[in-house]
Amino acid sequence: MDEIDRKLLNIIQSDFPIAQRPYEILGNRLGISAQEALARVGALIESGIVRRIGPSFDSQRLGHVSALVAAKVPTEYLEQVAAVVSSYPQVTHNYGRDCEYNLWFTLICENQEQLERVLQEIKHKAGIEEMACLPAKRVFKIQVDFAL
């Protein structure tokens, strides 16, 4: 990663241009061509440094429900179970922890019934015996940018 990549990452974290030609705008801001800006973003995605570029919605304001879910998973099956959990589009985050409940994920659904149905599907499909669902009561959103 060079200085242009760092500047590019600083921009796209929270100021990605919403325009017909966003890479042209990015290129102009960085002093490079639109093609190079696009290629650099593609390389950052390919390398895994950037996971995704897309909007972040306030799901509560859209009328959705969310929950933080913790599951007890035998350590030797953690990767397999995490893959099942991650296959659901309603799952936004999924990570392992070193504790009794060692797999945690966030789930956002259109309504409570869908949330309960998806949880039961995941539990059955992944073979999870014990799971704790912690529904969101109040959401605290913070803006996180990583200065590079």
Image (tube, grey):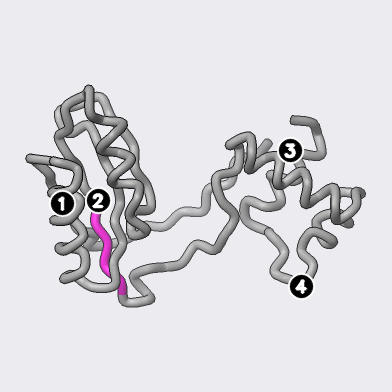
Instruction: Indicate which disc, 4 or 2, sits on the residue closer to the N terminus.
Output: 4
Circle 4 is placed at which residue position?
20
Instruction: Indicate which disc, 1 or 4, sits on the residue closer to the N terminus.
Output: 4
The residue located at (23%, 73%) in the rendering is: 111
Q: Is residue 140 magenta?
A: no
Q: What is the spatial separation of the Cα atoms under label 4 and label 2, in whole angstroms?
A: 36 Å
* SS majority, magenta: strand
Q: Quadrant of residue 136?
A: bottom left
The residue mark sitting in front, 1 or 4, is 4
The residue located at (57%, 60%) in the rendering is: 54
Please state which amino acid type lies under the numbered disc 1: Cys
Q: Is residue 67 magenta?
A: yes
Relative image position of residue 116 (x, y in whole percent): 15, 63
- The magenta region covers 64-68
Instruction: Indicate which disc, 3 or 2, sits on the residue closer to the N terminus.
Output: 3
Circle 1 is placed at which residue position?
133
Please state which amino acid type lies under the numbered disc 3: Arg
Instruction: Indicate which disc, 4 or 3, sits on the residue closer to the N terminus.
Output: 3
Do the numbered discs 1 and 2 sit on residues whose CB atoms are within 8 Å? Answer: yes
Do the numbered discs 3 and 2 sit on residues whose CB atoms are within 8 Å? Answer: no
Circle 2 is placed at which residue position?
68
